[in-house]
Amino acid sequence: MSLFVFGAFMLLQENLQHFLTGLGDQIRINAYLEKGLGTSDVQSLGVRIKTFPEVERARHISQEQAWLDFSAALGAQSSLLDGLPRDALPSSFEILLKPAYRDGPVVEDLANRLKKEKGITAVEYPQEWIDRLSLVVLAVQWTKWFLGGVLFMAAFFIAGSTVKLAILARKDEIEIMQLVGASEELIQAPFVLEGMIQGIAAGAVSVVGLWSLFRFLDRQVASSVGLFGASAQLQFLDLKSIALLLAIGWLLGAAGSLFALRRFVRTWKS
Amino acid sequence: MSLFVFGAFMLLQENLQHFLTGLGDQIRINAYLEKGLGTSDVQSLGVRIKTFPEVERARHISQEQAWLDFSAALGAQSSLLDGLPRDALPSSFEILLKPAYRDGPVVEDLANRLKKEKGITAVEYPQEWIDRLSLVVLAVQWTKWFLGGVLFMAAFFIAGSTVKLAILARKDEIEIMQLVGASEELIQAPFVLEGMIQGIAAGAVSVVGLWSLFRFLDRQVASSVGLFGASAQLQFLDLKSIALLLAIGWLLGAAGSLFALRRFVRTWKS
Amino acid sequence: MIQLFHVTKTYPPKSQALTDVHLEIGKGEFVFLAGPSGAGKTTLLKLLFREEEPTEGRILIDGKNITRLNSRGIARLRREIGLVFQEFKLLPRLSALENVALAAEVVGMPRRESQTKAYQLLREIGLRDRYDAKPLTLSGGEQQRVAIARALVNDPLIVLADEPTGNLDAEAADETMRLFLKIRENGTTILIASHDLELIKRYGSRVIALRQGRVADDLHRVQQEGSVG
Amino acid sequence: MIQLFHVTKTYPPKSQALTDVHLEIGKGEFVFLAGPSGAGKTTLLKLLFREEEPTEGRILIDGKNITRLNSRGIARLRREIGLVFQEFKLLPRLSALENVALAAEVVGMPRRESQTKAYQLLREIGLRDRYDAKPLTLSGGEQQRVAIARALVNDPLIVLADEPTGNLDAEAADETMRLFLKIRENGTTILIASHDLELIKRYGSRVIALRQGRVADDLHRVQQEGSVG
Ligand SMILES: Nc1ncnc2c1ncn2[C@@H]1O[C@H](COP(=O)(O)OP(=O)(O)OP(=O)(O)O)[C@@H](O)[C@H]1O
Ligand SMILES: Nc1ncnc2c1ncn2[C@@H]1O[C@H](COP(=O)(O)OP(=O)(O)OP(=O)(O)O)[C@@H](O)[C@H]1O
Ligand SMILES: [Mg+2]
Ligand SMILES: [Mg+2]
């Protein structure tokens, strides 16, 4: 039960992370090129750009393409462009950054360095969008920690009281074992063992529960159009997380039982 | 404790709601006007638009203003506009919808009706953005229910085992009270009373805890620039929610105790 | 006062503790329930305060059938009965005095009065010095006497006592018996399960001997005969 | 075997249960601990199996000082001692047989052997039919006999029994005593707290009388004198 809560948190975390990455993909730097640059020049510039460590991908957008994109963006007012020549817009590179570098100052720095490249006339990046994104990241981060804290407390509390109930129910047993001279190890063994088994079982149940919940949600989401593309795809926990969940269950079960037992035996007579 | 979890959920819910509203504010319909419309015509059209039930606010954007906005939006490429006359762009109304109507089909319907108004040449609205938004709303909704479910289960479990512990600790007392002929009410009264008091106390502690947590988070957020404007302002629970939290604590405490007690007494001898 | 008609008690699955017991005990009688270990003494007492229901037969107390009672009725019945258990059943968190007083408060006696009464009883039974002690800090015999005091605090119509002197030395047992006899003068019926033959010989006005769940013997001693109701 | 030097036990805050007790009990002795309720009998036994520590004085068992033991040492000590408690202390979820066998398994006896031994003991003590019953379904006397069997299953060096016959009829008490005597033949020291004067008169080879926490009397009966070690 307590692990279920924990697992739910991990699932959420995973998906939020994924969602953020999806958002981050929309941070793109546009580097506009000089007019009349030859194809080979464009290609070598593309290669050059890709050597920057921050760059994930760079896509060349021809003048043609730029024109089409722009008029699509203008929508109803595309008639505005009727008077302009087709090559009014410069060709450009659309640069996608690696996740780690999607941060205001880094982007600015990169933009400055790109500006110095031969063949590039201007560099544009969505300053406002980047700032917003970092705020969203921050908010999500905080929400995550906040929720995580609450859930962790809840999980801990639940685990604690489960163990307490188990011990209270077997108080007499412990006392009598002590009176007939059983060693401490012998008294503790069944509790620790039970704790371990219960911990793993709880972990397994949680994983299964989460999985079915996940399937349900996934289907719900899939049925509403996936406009976010890949980023709207829900992610389930990977194998490592599942193993971690089970391990935590195992440890928490064993350690919790032992800890509670010792404390309990100590305060026995009070 | 269990109420703390619950309160945390409510706090989260409140802020998500607020955040969504903030996002929804960015759904705007642009209604472009015929060129050469007189000031009084524009004004009466503005009044007319405001009579639509879906409309929250409508702002007139003059040709001048449209030009400025557009060139700002073009950024580095604003030179593109140099060859165009200043009045190339039409004036328009920027229409903000009421929250309840910020939905794809509704917006489309409204756009069609607006188009039929005299003086309006074209209506534009961010189709993609609306679809995205509804997906985000959906995702948030689901996350909320998912988390809410998990938290609620956790809260219920915690409350249950707290009561169980309390009863187990006083099992003998109940049994002896029964044996000396105490009436059921007399036996239950202290438990129910204790449950009530604990419930309210837990509620109060939760509110205080949430409040201090909130203050902390709020300060953290405030220190990073508020680019989202009003929507980045965190909201604390209002008085009604606090009262609700306390009432839930009270009820849960009383009912939980009574319920557990009755079940416990019934399965006494097994 | 107490009437049992053909009472049989079988514990599931098949342990027959009482078989066809037929008894009448009158108001104010002082009865010993004798018999070897496992004869059914405790079971018989449990039937009388409705801890158990008889498998067959009827039990009347004061003319009322107690085999058909809801929980409210059981509570009312028990308020008329003073109980002393083989295992004492004292509340470990209350002092001796509070344990005794509790039983009185439960039936509605005001706090002060119940405390005074409890203190008086504890004094009579030889616990003047230890009335403020918690049960776990009392010796076995002391606990037993607290349990006896609790059974008597409400001036019950019936006292059911299970081995009330099992943990008492001869002197304390005598004191306890004298207390029972005094209570009896108010018309209280007293039923004591015991195998202390010495005690039975000295105090028993009537001895019902159980053997393997049957009434083997029902001896009225003439010189102390109570009025049979 | 058992030696107490000037042992005083004061329960906080100020209840003096034992005062300056000086005793020597030899190997294989059969000793009754007599005295009225509250005299300190149970307290003395509790000191011997280290449920309590003496406030003053030293206690040696087999020459070893048991006042300074860690939890491991206490466990080792208790494995040499068979205990019968005033309140039985049986595990409600185990059957009578399992309760007895458990004590043997705890010290490392294989399961089969411990069960056989437990069954044999229960038979000797008159519980042949009820060995499979849970303690709560046993009568008081039956529970007491299970507790006695548990104390004897490990062939302990010392048996400490607190009112082992308080809930037994005369016949069952006799059987129990005979069992104790038989165990004693292997050299087991037996110390029984009781106020059943009848029983003490019949079986006691040595009677230590406590009164208000002091040894008031220490009577060796010559005809049954055990070898004092
Ligand atoms: N809850 C129960 N379930 C099954 N059998 C029971 C139960 N309670 C008692 N018995 C059996 O019924 C028989 C009578 O038990 P009871 O407790 O009435 O004896 P008793 O006369 O009080 O004996 P003692 O003097 O040892 O206390 C015993 O054989 C006992 O094992
Ligand atoms: N844990 C304790 N705290 C305080 N006082 C105690 C505690 N245990 C026992 N006493 C007191 O010490 C005295 C001796 O108690 P003990 O249990 O040794 O008597 P006993 O000889 O076994 O009596 P009985 O025959 O009634 O069982 C009693 O007055 C008792 O109230
Ligand atoms: Mg009995
Ligand atoms: Mg004692």
Image: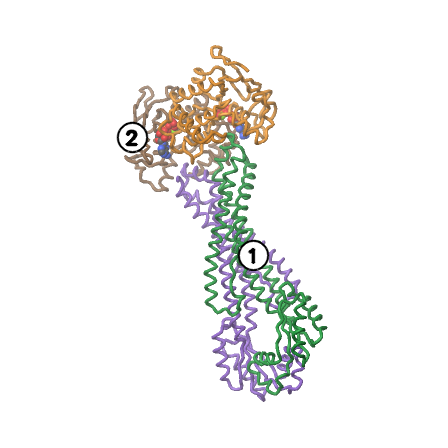
Chain colours: A purple, B green, C orange, D brown
Q: Which chain does the numbered disc 1 sit on?
A: B
| Residue under the image location 66 percent in, 86 percent down | A83
Label 2 secondary element: strand
Q: For this view, does A69 lie left or right of residue D38?
A: right
Mark 2 belongs to chain: D
Where does label 2 land, which residue? D19
- Residue A217 x, y percent position in the rendering: 62, 59
The circle on residue B147 is 1
Examine the rendered structure and indicate whether residue A47 appears above or below residue D105: below
Q: Residues within 10 Å of mark 1 (few under 14, many from 20)?
A: some
Q: How many marks?
A: 2
Most foreground residue, D221 or C116: C116
The residue type indicated by label 1 comes to: Leu
For this rendering, which residue is in front, D58 or C151? Answer: C151
Q: Quadrant of the C terminus of chain B?
A: top right
Asked if the beta carbon under badge 2 is closer than 8 A to the nearest atom of ligand 2, the reply is no
Tell me the crowding category of disc 2: few under 14, some 14 to 19, or many 20 or more residues within 10 angstroms, Cα based.
some
Amino acid carrying mark 2 in the image: Thr
Name the residue at the right extreme: B116
The residue sitting at 48% across, 62% down in the picture is B218
The local secondary structure at tag 1 comes to helix
Q: Position of residue B224 (x, y in %)?
A: 47, 68
Q: Which quadrant of the picture is home to ligand 2?
A: top left
